[in-house]
Amino acid sequence: MRVKRTAPGKVFLSGEYLALEGGSAIILSTKQRSRVSIEDHEKPYNLFYSSALDQSFQFSVNDNFEVDWVENDPQSFGLFISLAICELKIKPSKTLISIDTNEFYSSGKKIGLGSSASIAAAIINVLDEYFNLQLSESAKIQKAVNIHALSQDNFGSGLDVITSCADSGVVECNLKMANEHKWRSLKWPSDLYIKGVITSDQSSTKMMIEKYNRGKDSNQIFFNKLYSEINHLLNQISTAWDTQNSAKIIELMQTYNTFINQLNEKFNLGIFTDEHKRLIVLARSADIFYKPSGAGGGDLGLVMTNSEKKLTQFLTKLSHNNYQTIDLR
């Protein structure tokens, strides 16, 4: 018997930090997907194969549903195996579990597309079917949220897991909706174009959120005022998506970038690295919108425009500047 499931990655288009406070976020599930499978095999032990390491690891499961790595320990690459088995209280026997995350890497470097949320969604689905647990859709989402939160030391909003579980293109979600395992599916405007730009810097979402929380705690009056302004803007962005007004979406996103930069400078977050700043200037010269993706600080940038011609010209300029771009949808 073999069961295979996939789940998409994600990029936050708006609402990244404010989602932590209950604000609304617009999130795109990407074409990049993790692929998780489990199958019977003839060996008298369990194996885990990681595409990221291109290596297999032998493991057993004790009566407390704890994974024991027999020889080599895959460390963080095997974390979701351990968390999912404990969360579901299952004891695999003579199985091969594979996790393929190749689509989340470029030249051996992770590119910040939410691979951990994607894995969490896929592994719960695959184990649920293989072991015939018959979990409800809501229960599977909650299990995925649980193991992802544990993997991230309970940092983050969990909206990335909801997006990977929804697998519904572009969605709007907030903490209240996420807690109820709900989201709102949006339609992508036909004249809105997006590309990802891979930067040379790498970032840690956990570290960025830690800095954000410290900044918020020590600048509460400033934060409350800015939060109110950004929250109002996020509602306007939501309306622009509903009306399929790509020009308005981009205009509001530019204002959103300005607000996020105020937060960045006040809290010294490092969202806008020097490379992101250069790309913003380069994009502006081509009448293109650019923003750091997610928590910022490196990894990936997003290019958005409602002109296919301008996008093509800008991608050529990026190529001449040795930047690699990726399709996200």
Image: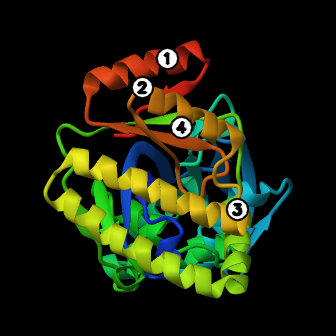
Which numbered marker is on residue 286?
A: 2
Q: Earlier in the sequence, mark 3 or mark 2?
A: 3
Query: Label 1 sits on what residue type?
Result: Lys
Label 2 vs label 4: CA separation? 10 Å
Q: Amino acid at mark 4?
A: Ile
Vertical relation: 97 (above or below) 148: above
Q: How many marks?
A: 4
Left or right, 19 with respect to 247, comes to right
Q: Which mark is residue 317?
A: 1
Q: Position of residue 69 (x, y in %)?
A: 79, 62
Report helix, strand or loop for mark 2: loop
What is the crowding at mark 1: few (fewer than 14 residues within 10 Å), some, or many (at least 20)?
some
Tell me where residue 57 appears, x and y as whole percent. Answer: 74, 51
Quadrant of the rendered structure where residue 289 is?
Answer: top left
Task: Locate the N terminus and report the quarter of the image it occupies.
Answer: bottom left
Which tag, 2 or 1, sits closer to the chain's start? 2
Disc 2/disc 1 C-alpha distance (Å): 9 Å
* Horizontal side of residue 50 vs 248, given as left or right: right
Q: Which residue is mark 4?
A: 280
Q: Secondary structure at mark 3?
A: loop
- Asked if disc 4 and disc 1 are in contact, CB closer than 8 Å, the reply is no
Q: Nearer the viewer, residue 205 or 93?
A: 205
Question: Which label lies toward us, 2 or 1?
Answer: 2
Residue designated by label 3: 269
Residue 241 location, quadrant: bottom left
Q: Is tag 4's residue or tag 1's residue first in the polypeptide sequence? A: 4
Q: Position of residue 167 (x, y in %)?
A: 32, 57
Asked whether, in this view, residue 190 is left or right of residue 116, the answer is left
Q: Label 4, label 1: how many angstroms apart (C-alpha)?
A: 13 Å
